[in-house]
Image (cartoon, rainbow, N blue to C red):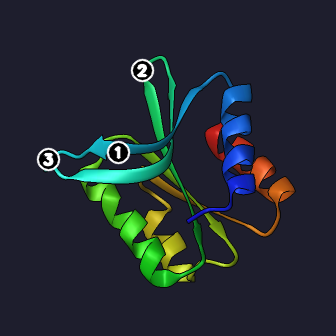
Amino acid sequence: MPSNGHLHVARTVLESLGYNVEEKVRVKGLSGFEHDFDLLARKGEKVICVSIRPANPTKLLSEIVKGIDIKHEIIVAVEGEPPPKALEFTRESRIKIIAFKNPEELVKKLRQTIA
């Protein structure tokens, strides 16, 4: 569960980039299964699902697996240092992992990832 501060920071960044943002959303996957995300951002046809998680390998893996079932871009903002293999796995996919240590770094990396 992300802190309200990190959720607010991510939402503010997305809105400043022109996205309409919803919090605590469920997205139906191609399988029919519903997946939970902290934020859903829409801008025209573009949809980004955002999760904010601690650098826990199990929680991170559960977020990565959602990418198999969800057709939208997924950003997982990880507080701390994610496992290097997770970063390798997502380097060439619709799933982007950004690591951050503080709110300022979250702002910077989220803007870089979306731009």
**Where residue 75 sits: x, y (%)?**
53, 52
Seen at 31% across and 53% down, the residue is 35
Specify the farthest residue to the left: 31
Judged from the image, the secondary structure of the residue bearing numbered disc 3 is loop
Specify the farthest residue to the right: 104
Judge depth for marks 2 and 3 and give the one in front.
Answer: 3
Which numbered disc flags the more N-terminal residue, 2 or 3? Answer: 3
Seen at 60% across and 78% down, the residue is 55
Q: Which mark is residue 45?
A: 2
Q: Amino acid at mark 1?
A: Arg
Which numbered disc flags the more N-terminal residue, 1 or 2? Answer: 1
* Residue carrying label 3: 32
* Residue carrying label 1: 26
Seen at 79% across and 69% down, the residue is 101
Seen at 14% across and 47% down, the residue is 32
Front residue of 87/62: it is 62
**Where residue 63 sits: x, y (%)?**
41, 64
